[in-house]
Amino acid sequence: MEEQPGNKTKHSDIIPTDGAMAVKPTVAIVCGGDSSEHDVSLRSAQGIYSFLDKERFDVYIVEITGTTWEAHLDDGLKASVSREDFSFEHSGRRVHPDFAYITIHGTPGENGILQGYFDLIKMPYSTSSVLVEAMTFNKFTLNQYLKGFGVSVSESLVVRQGYEDLVTDDEIINHIGLPCFVKPNAGGSSFGVTKVKTIEELRPAIRKAMNESPEVMVEAFMPGTEITCGCYKTSVKSVVFPITEVVTHNEFFDYDAKYKGEVEEITPARISESLAERVSLITSKIYDILGCFGIIRIDYIITKVQGEDGKEHDRINMLEINTTPGMTVTSFIPQQVRAAGLDIKDVLTDIIEDKLGKRA
């Protein structure tokens, strides 16, 4: 059957009549986006492309930059992607993807905007829903929501663009303390983040963060051990990956530490078995509280607190949730998958086929 440009029949819906094998579902790896992490997203897309099972799926990379949506083709060319149905031309036929694997770090793929679009055109995708993506993208909102479920988070407040003078520097410092972190409230954790040590550094840090987001979160500093834990669930399984310990000699886990190798990543983390079990349980609990889908990664700080028994205890403090975590070969999630003795190809297949199965 030859598809016409306006034909919206999807590859996975074509039923062969000559006894041939059914056409494989087409997966579009959606990357790029409009944040400072655009190029990082392209690297994640290349990682996912290398991981996906090409015997099960036809795979394309689709790059989104503003209103320019383009599919990367095998011959090095690019094809414009229709925003009406996310289809594009390749080798004289119209390609209609069956599934979107979203790996945009930032807007519009990590804040619910793109998820809303895919809901409208009824295309399954790899991440959580619009509401979950919007909430996890807004750090302050997420923290306040999860506090109601007993999740420990740092003390914080929000400064909004145009309303910076509603709170004075002294009021911020008296409430949050020094040192503190100033970061974009709606965005990733790689750009626009400053560790503020003096009151004089506060306003320049707020202005820097506002280059990334119109809302800025000022967050109390928590000394301790930084760890991160990945998780995914399907209709038939729940998997929490081994925990990674993050050791950096920089002021904090910034862009250089994250993407230029200025960090030591230890998987599994050098923490006690009982603490690791607690972290895994909290990760799974947060996943269920929010109603997540696909792979997420939750960052934590382990601090020491004085218990009622007078002894020191470990407190697990959530920092943030990544719903489209980095997926290069050296990123945290592939590391944790390997440490678990799993194959990243099988993990991605689980996620895609679970969602396609639910649609059917």
Image (spheres, rainbow, N blue to C red):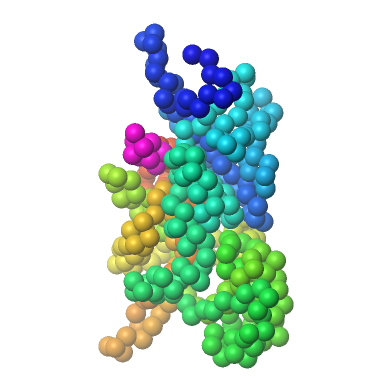
**In the rendered structure, does residue 359 fall within the stretch colored magenta?**
yes
Residue at left 45%, top 28%? 25
Q: Is residue 202 above or below residue 336?
A: below
Residue at left 56%, top 42%? 30
Count the marks. Answer: 0
Work out which residue is located at the far top of the displayed protein and give it: 18
| Magenta span main SS | helix
Residue at left 58%, top 62%? 187
Answer with left or right where residue 281 lies relative to residue 136.
left
**In the rendered structure, does residue 186 fall within the stretch colored magenta?**
no
Image quadrant assignment for residue 179: bottom right
Residue at left 50%, top 49%? 116
Image quadrant assignment for residue 147: bottom left
Q: Nearer the viewer, residue 343 or 249?
A: 343
Answer with left or right where residue 183 lies relative to residue 308.
right
Residue 280 in view, yes or no: no
Residue 224 at what x, y percent from top left? 47, 75
Residue 238 at what x, y percent from top left? 31, 50
Residue 79 at what x, y percent from top left? 66, 30
Residue 357 at what x, y percent from top left? 34, 36
Q: Quadrant of the C terminus?
A: top left
Q: Nearer the viewer, residue 178 or 322?
A: 322
Residue 34 in view, yes or no: yes
Q: Which residues are magenta?
A: 351-360
Q: Nearer the viewer, residue 14 or 51?
A: 14
